Image: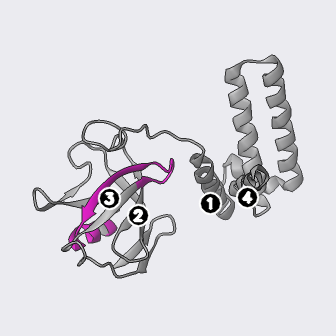
Amino acid sequence: MYDYDNTKQQKVQMELNFEKLNGLVPAIIQDDCTGKVLMLGFMNREAYEKTVETGLVTFFSRTRQTLWTKGETSGNLLHVVSIKADCDNDSLLIKVHPDGPVCHTGTDTCWGEKNEADICFLSYLQDFIEKRHQEMPEKSYTTSLFKSGVNRMAQKVGEEAVETVIEATNGTDERLIYEASDLIYHLIVLLTSKGMRIEDLARELQKRHK
């Protein structure tokens, strides 16, 4: 058995306990981008191995007694980002990128929730920015910021802060959101260059709140 992390392109050996539930383990499916829990399914050993092999979530149907790849009919596939076992190795947390609504009723999740980006997306965005920092691809604006140095990145944060203030005091709500988004993006780039995370800010604010 292998733990699976598609973001790092690696598999880590592990042994799952399929015996507790007569050959099955529950698999919680979570959107890697939004953090929303999408559904719960069950996997036997074969379904798990197929999921790891293909990178598409495959379950074992308890009613039909057969494997089924989620989205094989609807086209709403679940692309695996990572798979982690719990402390007892008898359940899974699978983070995915979904192609569309997950529930057979047509809703985004099996709990009827909207699967929309919220504050969790900032962590996902910084993960992406950190990858840019590591790879430094050509023709990337983020790459150009890292190459410009800390002083220029800090200056950009200041410029975006001024533009945000202007829109707040003498602009439209739409432009305020646009400029404030630019501010947050450039701030995350600056934090990344200093080896810090947006979660560090959350922890500081939580500490002050207490």
Q: Are marks 3 and 4 in contact (CB under 8 Å)?
A: no
Instruction: Kindly tell me whether residue 60 is visible in this rendering.
Output: yes
Q: Secondary structure at mark 4?
A: helix
On screen, residue 127 versus residue 54, left or right, reads right
Q: Of the residues under marks 4 and 2, which one precedes in the sequence?
A: 2
- Residue 127 percent coordinates (x, y): 61, 57
The residue range painted magenta reads: 30-52
User: Does residue 120 appear to the left or right of 49 in the view shown?
Assistant: right
Mark 4 → mark 2, Cα distance in angstroms: 25 Å
User: Which one is closest to the eye, mark 3 or mark 2?
Assistant: 2
Q: CA distance from mark 1 to mark 3?
A: 23 Å
Tell me which numbered mark, 3 or 2, is placed earlier along the sequence: 3
| Mark found first going from the N terminus, 3 or 4 | 3
Q: Is residue 111 above or below residue 55?
A: above
Mark 4–mark 2 contact, CB under 8 Å?
A: no
* Front residue of this view, candidates 11 and 90: 90
Q: Which mark is residue 93?
A: 2
Horizontal and vertical percent position of residue 102: 32, 44
Which residue was labeled with disc 1? 131
Q: Which residue is mark 3?
A: 56
Q: Nearer the viewer, mark 1 or mark 2?
A: 2
State the CA–CA distance, disc 3 to disc 2: 14 Å
Q: Is residue 20 left or right of residue 166?
A: left
Q: Residue at x 33, y 74 (%)?
A: 90
Checking the image for residue 152, the label placed there is none
Mark 1 → mark 4, Cα distance in angstroms: 18 Å
Helix, strand or loop at mark 3: loop
Q: Position of residue 121 (x, y in %)?
A: 58, 47
